[in-house]
Image (cartoon, rainbow, N blue to C red):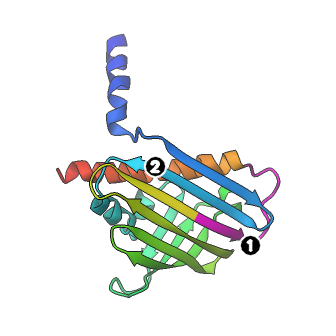
Amino acid sequence: MYKYLLWLFAALPAYGHAAQTNVATDIGMMGVSISAVTVINADARTVWDMLTDYNRLATFVPGMTLSRLVSSPNAAAKVVEQKGEGGLLSLVLPDHVVLKLSEQPYSRIGFRSVSGWVMSMQGEWVITGDSAPVTLRYRAHVVPALPPPPMLTDEYVQDEIRLRMNALAREAERRMQLNR
């Protein structure tokens, strides 16, 4: 039994995202700034396809209960509606938001809120590199509808963002393996 457990733990990195995800946050009275970066063992096209799979994001992003494209798939500026399960993180990131997107294929997705439970939210996803591994960066500035409570720490928000970034990385790496 013991050697089977050792084998299981030795095999785990092959099934999970092993790279370091760095997250920085600044929770202040004027909003919350978030910056996250991770290296993904997938090419830019695979990461792009995963990020722009708007109607399926909720199937692999923890805490997301809905993601759907509400504009035409061919629209110059796409519009996506997203909902989350709430909880403490919803005091920073809205649990309902409609985002207008600006896409630059395979390299950048800019976003800004057009409605939802937030005063404003804007940011970007940036993919650096063409072939595996690539770097995925996320930057956002969120002005919540209400000021974040003092009990909401940077560490809590960082852990939640890291959880979501790692889920995205795992999904991109899974898709990359399927395409080989």
Task: Please tell me which residue is depicted at 55% across the width and 68% down the height of the picture.
Answer: 83
Task: Please tell me which residue is depicted at 50% across the width and 45% down the height of the picture.
Answer: 21
Please give the label number shown on residue 123.
none
Q: Is residue 50 left or right of residue 62?
A: left
Secondary element at tag 2: strand
Q: Residue furthest front?
A: 129
Type of amino acid under label 1: Ala
Secondary element at tag 1: loop
Does label 1 or label 2 sit earlier along the sequence? 2
Q: Are marks 1 and 2 in contact (CB under 8 Å)?
A: no
Q: How many marks?
A: 2
Task: Please tell me which residue is depicted at 64% across the width and 64% down the height of the picture.
Answer: 93
Q: Is residue 165 magenta?
A: no
Q: Nearer the viewer, residue 114 or 4?
A: 114
Type of amino acid under label 2: Thr
Q: Is residue 12 visible?
A: yes
Q: Nearer the viewer, residue 175 or 81?
A: 175
The spot of residue 19 in percent (x, y) is 42, 40
Residue tagged by mark 1?
145
Q: Is residue 87 visible?
A: no
Q: Which residues are magenta?
A: 140-153
Q: Residue furthest left?
A: 180
Q: Nearer the viewer, residue 53 or 95?
A: 53
Residue tagged by mark 2?
38
Q: Is residue 122 left or right of residue 153?
A: left
Decide: few, some or many residues near mark 2? Use Cα within 10 Å; few <14, some 14-19, many ≥20. Answer: many
The spot of residue 31 in percent (x, y) is 73, 66
The spot of residue 97 in percent (x, y) is 58, 74
